[in-house]
Image (cartoon, rainbow, N blue to C red):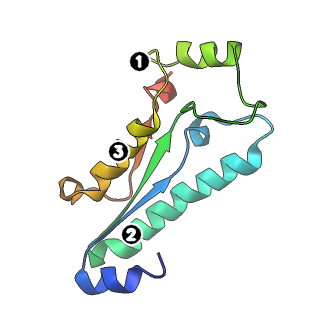
Amino acid sequence: MQLLLPDWRARKSGRVSNIGSEVTELGSPYRGNYVAAKGAMLAMTRSWATELGPEGITVNLVAPGWIPVRAPRRRKSGGGRARYVEGTPLAHFGTPEDVANMVVFLASEKANFITGQKFAVNGGHTLL
């Protein structure tokens, strides 16, 4: 962002899409450092949105749920996967493309009037 900001300021246009996590709403046992870092990302997103908005630069955060990709074996398996899906109104996992689609939308002209927001991409998991 340090490299891009001077050009964005000159053009009065720019987009920042930070990646957070649903854990800021759910908590996560034994992972307080991760939860705190993601919470700080939300706070930073909102601060930057306030600071950079007058210069035409939008800043938002995409907060995915559990998106199964190749991961270390210590991650949830079996019963944990089933419980997660059962707690999700759409009753399935998301994909990396689901997250990417939100980022692409926020980078588009269609998102000109959206800044300082957090978008959950988690099939409704944080509703329950």
Disc on the earlier residue, 3 or 2: 2
How many neighbours does mark 3 have within 10 angstroms: few (below 14), some (14-19), or many (20 or more)? some
Compared with 75, 39 (above or below) is below
Compared with 123, 31 (above or below) is below
Identify the residue position indicated by label 1 in the image: 90
Q: Secondary structure at mark 3?
A: helix
Residue drawn at point x = 54 percent, y = 17 percent: 85
Compared with 73, 120 (above or below) is below
Q: Which mark is residue 50?
A: 2
Looking at numbered disc 1 in the image, what kind of residue is underneath it? Leu
As rendered, which of 101 and 19 lies closer to the eye? 101
In whole angstroms, how far apart are the C-alphas of marks 2 and 1?
33 Å
Q: Mark 2 or mark 1: which is in front?
A: 1
Looking at numbered disc 3 in the image, what kind of residue is underneath it? Met
Q: How many marks?
A: 3
Q: Secondary structure at mark 2?
A: helix
In the image, 74: left or right of 89? right
Looking at numbered disc 2 in the image, what kind of residue is underneath it? Thr
Mark 2–mark 1 contact, CB under 8 Å?
A: no
